[in-house]
Amino acid sequence: MAAAGEAILSRPLALALVPATVHLVLGPLLPSAWAPAGLAALLLAALALSRGRAPLLRYTVCACLLPPLYTALRRALSLSPGPGISWPLLLLAHAASALAVTALELLPRAVPATASRTPTPLQPTITSRLLALSRPDLLPLAGAFTFLALAVIGGMFVPYYTGKVIDILGSQYDQRIFLFAIFCMCATSMGSSIAAGLRGGLFTFTMSRLNRRIRSQLFSSLVQQEIAFFDATKTGDITSRLSTDTALMSRSVALNVNVLLRSLVNTVGIVSFMFSLSWKLTLLIFIESPLTILIQKMYNLYHMRLVLQVQDSIARSNQLAGEIVSSIKTVRSFAAEDLESELFEKKLQETHQLKNKRDLVTAVYLLCHRLAQLLMQVVMLYCGQLLVNDGQMTSGNLIAFILYQMDFGDYVRTLIHMYSEMTHSVGAAEKVFEYLDREPRVHTDGTLVPESLQGHLEFKDVTFSYPAKPDVQVLQDVSFEVRAGEVTALVGPSGGGKTTCVSLLQRFYEPQSGRILLDGRPIQEYDHKYYHSKVALVGQEPTLFALSVRDNIRYGLDHCPQADVAAAAHSASARDFIERMDHGFDTDVGEAGGQISAGQKQQIAIARALVRQPRILVLDEATSSLDAHTELSIQRALAREPAAAALVIAHRLTTVQRADRIVVLEGGRVVERGTHSQLMELGGCYSRLVLGQFTNGEQGAAAGEKGSGHGERQ
């Protein structure tokens, strides 16, 4: 028995509502003399059972006390006692109690002075910044808000004149008054429709312009960030900011504010009209507002959770599909087509089940909402019929009131929904502004643009750790130089720091200590475009864009004649295969250069570097996919540029052994430097690398060459 009592008391919602429900149903059935005592007993039962469970306790207390208080006040003011405790009176008491408690719960509670309060200036700042971004659209926005006001005002008069027409038809017919009412109803309806169309068009126009403006600014900010930012940030997060969040931001002013203001003005106007038609029925409809808010909040709680789960599930499916399509050659080579199809089917099934749950929640919500509307309409018709019989309102006014009441619940629900949408828009704007306000850690604001550049490069005591792993030093006090007109090779085992040196030279990162000098000046001082036109990089896996061959070669150059493009392609031994293509230099290479071979991509990348006529050419395994004949042709072409300096990273000894200087990196330090023959005599790290290739049958003859001179052991 005690356990059963504990189980019942664990349901505060049902328990606290029981006294109010009994009070509403049985109150009018009590004899007049018993009414005060019966109400007091119900109140005591509510206090005992609720045990301080606010806000339901406050609702029950208010609903039970209002009827006897109303009767006592009428007697104290020497007014007629009225009809006594009746169902209309109790309905009004419950409606007023529900309205008061709901308003009290929705108001922000004051924070005690002793409590720690964290200032939140972010949302007002975001709102002001959104308005500032919308400033170029001030004129169309002003027009949109003007038409919004006209549409709302015109729409509110349509039910009013509909009721007038019914009153005219139900009483003594007067054709002049009838035609005037019809004219007013048609004029307000037509004007409201035209204004609504213009309002929607202007808001859509401003939303599109704001979306384009935000995306443009965000993309410009993103491409200015340092490479470490992209290393630490997922590509999906960036694309989500560019697509989803910018769309939510642009809707915040043009759509959300539009719907929010329209619903708010409509709600206030409808309540005013309803109050003028019947203040008693107006109080009664406030029973629907708390019920609508409760249903909407419960729906939002479950629906938003399922929406997020559906979005995550769709993202996982898309990620799997993209991974399979991009790796289709690997899938085909391992005959894993059926396996990948089954995996994708499982992802789709997971998404389907989540969508079914989401749709079920929506269906239950719509059912509860419709039932609540139907219940209110039945109560309204019953109470309205009593007022019409008492002569307190006409039939036309009752119909107009019901028309207003049908829209009232929808507008209240829209207000709640748009408040949630505005919150989401502010959250999305916060993420976007976080990227917009981010200052890149590698600045590109240098201004040095010398008329001539020798191309003398120096690394001086450079120490570097990647931002993702600050405790691991990739380079430690690295020093070497690349002289103009010479070829310097960086060699060493994997992980020695060769590619990191290239990344620092390209200004992808900043070293923690030490300096990188170009002609005796720090590379940070040079103008960004000028520097990268004089220092060109060709990587092992070059990136080509879905453009023509010509556009890929002259990528990043404002003015580049076709003669220079053809000359660079000839120097890279690429002109022959380019001219054999269907459209020559106008041939599209496909996404990431997928329409051409890996060797052809490297040749086009070399041509893209040579067309800039750089003073320093950085080749990071740039000929790894080329045959020996093509590689030799490119080396001869580079040799015809004696003034240019070259920094080569390669494992082929045919490239390295001809270098003027070889720098050996191991464990992030320079351990050896010298020529090929000098380093072979030392018998150190470089010699071991060469002998390792010889053991594997590569470059055997070159590995045995020795010459005069002395190397230097670090």
Image (spheres, helix red, strand yellow):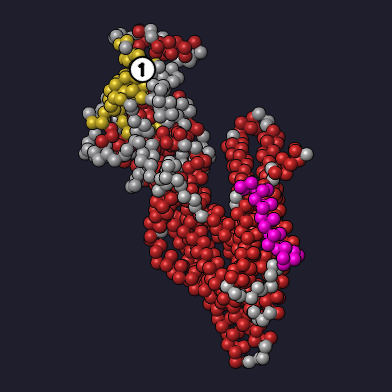
Q: Residue at x 38, y 9 (%)?
A: 684
Which residue is at the front of the view, 451 or 284?
284
For the stretch drawn in magenta, the main secondary structure is helix
Task: Indicate yes or no whether the magenta region holds residue 49.
Answer: yes
Mark 1 neighbour density, 10 Å: few (under 14) some (14–19) many (20 or more): some
Q: How many marks?
A: 1
The answer to whether one can see residue 31 in this image is: yes
Which residue is at the front of the view, 340 or 544?
340
Q: Which residue is mark 1?
A: 669
Task: Indicate yes or no whether the magenta region holds residue 376.
Answer: no
Q: Percent x, y for residue 495? A: 44, 20
> Residue 514's quadrant in the figure?
top left
The C terminus is located in which quarter?
Answer: top left
Which residue is at the front of the view, 173 or 59?
59
Q: Percent x, y for residue 23? A: 70, 59
Give the residue type at disc 1.
Arg
Q: Residue at x 25, y 36 (%)?
A: 525
Query: Is residue 449 shown left or right of residue 217?
Result: left
Q: Residue at x 29, y 40 (%)?
A: 445
The answer to whether one can see residue 634 in this image is: no
Q: Which residues are magenta?
A: 27-53
Q: Residue at x 58, y 64 (%)?
A: 411
Q: Percent x, y for residue 438? A: 38, 42
- Per the image, label 1 sits on a secondary structure element best described as strand
Compared with 380, 449 (above or below) is above
Query: Is residue 564 shown left or right of residue 411?
Result: left
